[in-house]
Structure formats: structure tokens, C-alpha cells
Amino acid sequence: MCVDSVLGIVNRLPFPGRRVWQRCHKAIFATHATRVLSVLIVLILALGSVPASATEQSLAGSFTYLKERGVTVSADSSAAELAEAIRPLLIDDATLARTLRYIADLRADDFGTREAASRELAKLHFPIDSLLVIPSSSVSRSQDLTWRVQQILAVRRPLALEDQLHHALAVIAEKPIPGMVAQLLSTASAVEHGDRQLLATLENALVASASVADKEILRSHLAPKHSVTTQKRATVALASILSGTDDDELEQLLATNDPDLQMAAAKGAALAGNSIGVPVLVSLLESSNTAVRCEAAEVLYACTGKDFGFAGYDDTHHRASSVKRWKQWLNSSKDGERLASAVPPVLAPTGRVIVGIQLKEEPTSDSGRSRGQKNAIERSNVIEFAPSGSIRWHMRSTDLRGGTAIASIPMREGARAIAFGTPEQVPQQSMSIRFFDNSGLGIGSMTGLAGMPALGLTSDGNLMIAAANEVVEVGSAGNLVSRTAFSNFADTIDHFSMILADRVMVVSATSGTVREYSRDGKLLFERNQLSKPVYARRHGDGSLLVAQHAQDAPAIASYDATGQLQWTFSPSNEMGKMNAVAALSNGNALFGSSMGLYEIGHSGSIGSIGSIGSIGGIGGIVRTWINGNVDFIYAD
């Protein structure tokens, strides 16, 4: 790393940042390992203090987004004004019924009926896209249906209606609007297969808006005719209302035989500051259903800020040890002490998707043309997408100063770290990392890195860098938190990520393994005999998505929480060579190739391109996000 350039950046920082740097730079540069990381401190200091809270900033961003799309609302708008502006963005029962009818008509025998349904779905100005990609292995999907849905999604994507809905829900969550519960529940039914970030925001809006007057509406949505997702959202809101006002009915919700609704009731009570459901959640850690155990652990962490090393997919011995610690804590704590005093860091995906891609660009100057550059050539671009596939921001080659981006990770307050190099020469060639603020302005750099380190974020905002066979964690104040060797000396770390509250997943193509370690390096899980794995990610239900780089193995393999193969996917020749894979929070995967960026769905999704594995189902293309040569994908 160039020390002089770093010090030059630091000298331009605001006064408090310089003082912090001056007090600790000797310790920072004491060892070679920490010298490599010092620019991270520069980034943190350069971001400076933020006058507004994170919630205020987020809300301001939502108001700005909506205003840019013609929805005139502000922090000063009254509840009536907010309702008038935002209500048209939500879905009511009539719109939901009409949408489902159109989707059913896509399977009609009559060609004219299918054509009419396609036209109506393409122009429907509501966020109903997730209804078109519902996974259902029991429903046959003809080539005509597959083609139609892909065309409808391609037309609808530029509308970015899910993004608009997300911002509207974020406003409702912070500025509740009376009388919106029925429409929010209908909206929940329409987006129940959407990304987890959208569903979490919808749940927050529902809980914030619900009042005692909405009890009957919420109770009616607990009926079996409604989807499990809608029942859960209604239960969370109802439990939050009942907490402290009707303990008998709340206890009935917690005593139901349905574990999904038990968890929802416990969560709703916790949101109202009532820990009555915590013992129920602890009991669900011993469920025979792996998905139930995983979700109970996730809800417990969100409520209490603790996890005691529990993972629902661990073996019986590991789970029993963690459950024992949970019960000991439960017996030694009082009701008023069980809930976290502040909301802990949430490990659920935030919906960020960052892609490095080579796009054709015209010559940018007369000098370029004079050198013979007459036609468009491929140049490196970095794009952030929303979960819906719409573009949030785009850094073109000129913004990247002509370098080739080979990795990127988002950081606090919209900043981002982007690594540069030549993909074909990794790890022989030295890499560099540049840091940009939320406006795209460069604010720091690291140079002279041997090989390409993998980057990750911890749940509490620390930055982690994996190189060779160890992971280094850097604290938010720039301090070195830990250095841990997670693999055998024969291994290399090809990918790693934080999972749960205190685990690191390490992928090694050298040994053909995916492993999970505690933060202190203890091996907790291993899946071996894989074919050159280069990526792995856990979903909330404990299922595992693995990308493999071997010609004789499927490019993507999905396993359930018990280790059984669910589905596989291998690209057709037309899709090009696999360059990158990432898991999405809706259960699908992103496949980046030399031809473009594709969303891949599991067995029963609308796509039909793919290969059948020896066990399990078929993966297929759901939709194309963008065409071009993809270099990398980051998704959380």
C-alpha cells in the first residue's frame, strides 16, 4: 500500500478525524498485516459523522424516491395527505382477485384469452411480479406459459413497482396511517413470494398501522383460506395489539398447534415490548422440523440479540448443547430482561445486488477516435440493482477511471469498496481496492495486494477480509478485532460470508469443501466432495446454495437444511461460460456469464432451460436482468 497517498488523504479529513488518526497511526503501521488494512480506517474516518439518525436518513430517502416518481409526500404531510398519496400504490382485494384471474387465463386453451391476459398483466400498475414466479412443482408449465411470463416480466421490469412499494411501506412504518390494514394484508398476499427485505418492511408497516379497531380484520385473516404468509403477518399485528390489553387471547395465539403462527405471535408480542413468547420460541428450537428450528432461532436473535451458537441445521449434539444454554439463560433471566434494549443488527438480506459487467461503450473523446477507436468496445461497469432487478446506481468506466472492477462490497452510508485487476491473472497479479462515497467520489485506496482478497461484512458493521487461509476483522473504529485461520494450510479461501450471528462460511475449491466456523475458528459444519465450489450461501430456512466450477458437475446445486439435493442447474451453450453466482433472498439465484445476468429459479419455476441432476429437480431461467459479460456478483 502507498503510505504517502494514505496520509495525504488523512490530512484532508475534518479535524476530529485527523486527531483520531494521529493518536493511533503508529499502532496501525506496527505490523505488515495491519498496514494492509489501514486504508479501511481512512474510509471510516472520511465518512465523518452523520447529523441525522439512520431512520431519518432512510425516511428522507423514501420521500425523495417517491417524489421523483410523482408521489408528492413529505415529512410534513398529514396522515390524510399520506393516505391519499400512498393508498393507490397498495393492492386491494379486487385488484388481487383480478390479477389472479389474469394469471389463470395464461393457461387457457383459447389463444385470444391468453393474449388478452398477457396484455393486462403487462400494463397492470401494481407490484404483482412475484405472483408470476411462484414456485409450484405440482403445476405444469408449458413452453407458451414460460415464454409469456418471461415477456411480461421483461416489460414490467422498468416500472420498478416493487421499489416504489418498498418506499411507500417504509413511510407507513414510520408515519402510521389509520385504516390501511385491510389493504396492507391484500398487498401481503400479492408479494408473499417477494424478497425478504420487502416482506419485512411490509410487516413493520402493518404493525405500526394496526390498532384495536382492526382486531376483527386481523382475526378474519387467520382463516385457512388465506396463505400462510398472510396469516403470519396478521398474527404479528394482532399479537402486538393484544399485548398488554388481552393476555388471554394472546396466550391462545401462542398455544396454537401451528408453529409458524406461534412464532408470529411471539414476534408480535416482542415488538410491543412483551417477552411472553420467548419461552415458546425456545421450545421450538427442539422442533422436528428443520425449517421451524431455523426460523425460531432467527426470531429469537431478533428479539433478544442472542443466539448461543444455535443453528437449526446442526447435528443433534450441537443443537442440544446450544438449547441447554438457551434454557439456562431463560431460567436465570426475568421477563423484563429478556428482550434486547435496542434492535440488534439484522442478518436478513438487505436486498443489495452489485454486479461488475463489461458493457459496450462508444468512444468518449475525439482522441479515442483518432487512435482508431471507431466502434463501441466493452468496458468495465459496476451497477447496483434492487431485488426487483431495477437499477439503483450505475458507475461507468469513466467513473471507475478505466480500471477493470473484479469485486465490490457496499459499506455504510452508501459508500462502496471496489477491487480492480485483471480477472484472468488473479491471483498472480497485484490487486488494488478503491473506496468511493455515495456520490461516486473516490475517498481512499489500497494497492500492492498480492492476490485477490474476498470481502465481507459482519452483522455489527465490521469489515472482514479473507486472503490466503485466514480472515481478518477490522472494527468500526479502525481497530484490528481478530485474525483467524479458518481452513487447513492446504486450502485457500475462494469465498466467505457471515451467517447467523457468530458464524463464518468458508468455501474452498482446493479441498472441494464448504465449511462453517465459529468466529474463533471452531469447525461447526462441513460439506465435502464438491466439484470445485466457488460460492455458497445459506437461506433463512437453512437450505444451502452452492456454485461449482467443474465441467462434470452442475453449475448450481441447492440442498435443503438436511443435506438432500433439491435442484440443480447447468447453463445451455447459448448462456455462455459461468463467471459468478449469488443467492437472492427470494430463494432464487443470480447466474452471471459471458452473455448476461440471469435469475434462476428452483424446481417448478417458470424457466425450462437447465439440466436435470441425478437427484432432485430442475433449475430454469426466470428472467434476464441485463446482457453483457458479467465479472462478479455481490448479493446480500
Image (cartoon, helix red, strand yellow):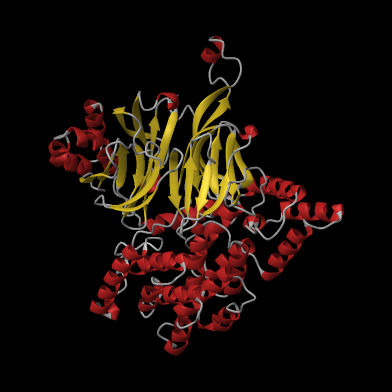
- Quadrant of residue 187 in the image? bottom right
Pick the front one: 85 or 263: 263
The percent coordinates of residue 254 (x first, y second) are 45, 81
User: Of all residues shown, which one is farthest toward the bottom?
Assistant: 248
| 243 w.r.t. 85: above or below | below
| Residue at figure coordinates x 52%, y 25% from the top left | 379
Vertical order, 104 against 551 (above or below): below
Q: In the drawing, does residue 274 fall left or right of residue 104?
A: left
Residue found 44% across the figure and 66% down from its top: 295
Give percent across and percent down for residue 184: 58, 69
Image side of residue 144 versus residue 12, left or right: right
In the rendered image, is residue 260 in sight? yes
Relative to 362, say whether 384 is above or below.
below
- Residue 526 image offset from top left, x and y in percent: 37, 50
Residue 300 in the image, given as x and y percentages of width and height: 37, 69
**Quadrant occupied by the N terminus:** top left
Q: Left or right: 575 with respect to 311?
A: right
Classify 6 as above or below 437.
above
* Residue at point 30%, 61% (across, down): 309
Looking at this view, is 419 or 279 the one in front?
A: 279
Toward the viewer: 320 or 414? 320
**Count of picture labels:** 0
Q: Is residue 73 visible?
A: no
